[in-house]
Image (cartoon, rainbow, N blue to C red):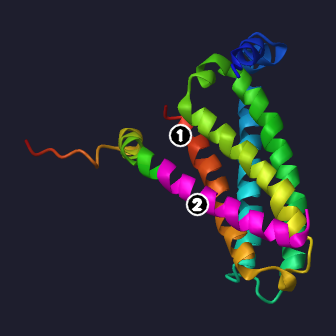
Amino acid sequence: MNKARLEKVAILLSSVVVVVAIIFWVAQVGDLMETLCLAYGDWCFSDDP
Amino acid sequence: MDMFFLFEWLDTSMLADMSKAYGGVFAVVQMLHLTALALLGGTVLVSDLRLLGVLLNDVSSESVVSNMDRWFSVALLLIVVSGVFMSSAVAIKLYYNEMFWAKMIGLFFGAAFVYFIRRPLLRHPHDTINVWSIRMIAISSMIIWFTVAASGRWIGFS
């Protein structure tokens, strides 16, 4: 692949990676917080009734 | 493509017998896996932050990237070899683990991105490459390898 094409592919693929990664981590954020909470303490649960 | 047969084979292989029977061997291999992951993360951070102009600005980016590339390949090889050994101990469990697949997709995509896009492009003198291509490569590279490491850590919690 020549340089000009590589540059275009790099920008396109990198943009896709950034968007997919943001969607992936935003979709996982609830599970992530719960997992971290269960693993490292109960700081995300409130004691208030 | 259903890859269950591969995990079934791995679960009954000699590798699995060894990883399940000898906790000490497993621990040493796990230590190698984590060390290699730290090395890979270090090479990614140094070369990508240099490409973004954040650090080592008194050294040419070509020099930093080519030095880091060697260690990246060593780290990736170590990660894959030790990872196969470690996964043999819990092969069937991993097959049903979503985060394991997220890590594998990230790993294969990241390796393909490095060897087929990033390296061929960065072989050219960096000052002749479109600056946005370099920036996007650096940002996406850090995101990919962060996702691989974070989803790998998450396997342990799920």
For the stretch drawn in magenta, the main secondary structure is: helix
Against B90, residue A8 (above or below) is: below
Magenta-tinted stretch: A1-24
Query: Which residue is at the front of the view, B123 or B42?
Result: B123
Question: Which three-letter amino acid code belongs to the residue tagged 2?
Answer: Val
Residue that mark 1 sits on: B154
Q: Which residue occupies 83% across, 35% down?
A: B81
Chain hosting mark 2? A
The residue furthest top is B12
Give the camera-side residue of A4 and B75. Answer: A4
Q: Which residue is mark 2?
A: A18
Q: How many marks?
A: 2
Looking at the rendered structure, the secondary structure element under dot 1 is helix
Q: Amino acid at mark 1?
A: Trp
Residues marked 2 and 1 touching at CB (< 8 Å)? no
Q: Looking at the picture, how far across and down is residue B7, in whole percent? A: 72, 18
- Is B25 left, or right, of B99 in this rendering? right
